[in-house]
Amino acid sequence: MDIPPKFTNWPIWDDQDISMVSNVIKSGNWWCGAPKNKVGNQVWDFQDEFAHYLNANHAFACTNGTHAIEICLRALGIGLGDEVIVSDWTFVASASAVVAVGAIPIFCDIDAKTFLIDSQQIKKLITPKTKAIICVHLGGMPCNLKVILQIAKENDLKIIEDCAHGHGSRYKGKSVGLWGDCGTFSFQASKVLNAGEGGAIICNDDHIANKIYEILDSGRHPGEWFYDHFTFGSDYRLGELNAALLRSQLKKYPKQFEKRNQSAIYLNSALSLIPGVHPQKRYDYVDGCANYVYIVYFDPEYFGGIDYKIMYKELSQAGIPTDACYPPLHRLELFQKVKLLPNIDYSNANWGNEKSNPEHFPIVEKIYRNAFQLDHRVLLSDQPALDYIVGTLKKIQEKYSI
């Protein structure tokens, strides 16, 4: 077997990261305070810098990406008994955040080429109870937002963009997260921009921004007394240490973003020449993709009928960094057996018990059985690493096609 090349380690850090965090520790100001009475400046500065990077009017740092979605749902007035359409292929948080506010996630099958929410299926899932769509930019690849926005407009629906994978991804020249009512981000340890944990929300609407801040900071209003609480909120504030690390990481991120795009475009071209290998489709409307993971569907007819388990075993033995694909939401036990919030009627959901059977979600079932994800550090590696991946897939195909 060929000796695998050196792949980039993750996370990437340097003395600047250490200095930023160390300075916060030494300052003794470990939390941000309030807009009128600031204690530390890291959170406030990061919010400004992140907003500037994405060209957003408002950015709010928070505890994590899951809470970011919950905050947006509450800010948009979505709650008990409301239905929210969510892609069936995503991390559980895209749906569990809907459950957390008392609403009901409705799972939408995916497009066979982009692996993203199928806009044509969205139309079939809308009911009088539907209040919003969560567009998950899986792998950082932008959904077809023009079509989804039109559906939302025609049906008076809100749009939350789940950009946990999409820091800096652009659809028709504008950052994801700014097309809908608001966009959410994650800074968890594996994400392309990370501080171990953390999240953020961006939006351009001043009214929504005010609601987001109220909910994020215990119902407070900027400029009012710290112990005045004007509406129901909670403490979702990010700490100064995480924000300091994010500020340092953000300075390095644009260069990494461009490297990921160059590598992904190269792999798209090279892998597409292998019969039966189909990387996640990148349409012309995508001006940039964060490529949190690089997703590939392989047609079992060209690989001797193997599934993802054998493919992952082969890639692992070859020393190629991979990331497990998310199980489709309808497969998860909490939704199959309806282990959710008490006293809420989930009977009209399109999942649970026999409604979670695979035949009801045919495209995601097909893709999931024969897909693998390359870890995003692969895309930060040098050219020989990319060629090694291409060569390895050719050898796997030769091995099982006999």
Image: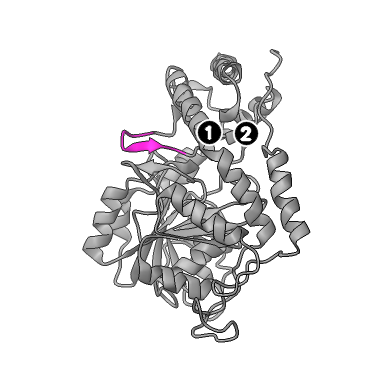
The alpha-carbon separation of the residues under discs 1 and 2 comes to 22 Å
- Numbered mark located on residue 242 in the image: none
Residue 136 shows in this picture: yes
Q: Nearer the viewer, residue 381 or 95?
A: 381
Q: Is residue 92 visible?
A: no
Query: Which residue is the site of mark 1?
Result: 255
Secondary structure category for the residue under label 1: helix
Query: Residue 131 in the image: x percent, y percent?
Result: 35, 69
Does residue 220 lie above or below 329 as drawn? below
Q: Is residue 211 left or right of residue 322?
A: left
**Pair 1/2: label in front:** 1
- Tag 2 secondary structure: strand
Q: Residue furthest right?
A: 26
Q: Residues within 10 Å of mark 2 (few under 14, many from 20)?
A: some
The residue that appears at 60% across and 17% down in the rendered structure is 388
The x and y percentages for residue 123 are 28, 57
N-terminal label among 1 and 2: 1
Q: Is residue 284 found inside the magenta-colored segment of the image?
A: yes
Residue bearing mark 2: 322
Q: Quadrant of residue 218?
A: bottom right
Q: Residue at x 50, y 68 (%)?
A: 71
Residue 369 covered by magenta stretch: no
Q: Is residue 264 above or below residue 34?
A: above
- The amino acid on which the numbered mark 2 sits, given as a three-letter code, is Thr
Q: Position of residue 116 (x, y in %)?
A: 41, 45
Dominant secondary structure of the magenta stretch? loop
Q: Quadrant of the N terminus?
A: top right
Q: Nearer the viewer, residue 17 or 196?
A: 17
Q: Give the magenta part as a residue range.
A: 282-289
Is 296 on the left or on the right of 207, as rendered?
A: right
Residue 39: percent from left, percent from top: 65, 69
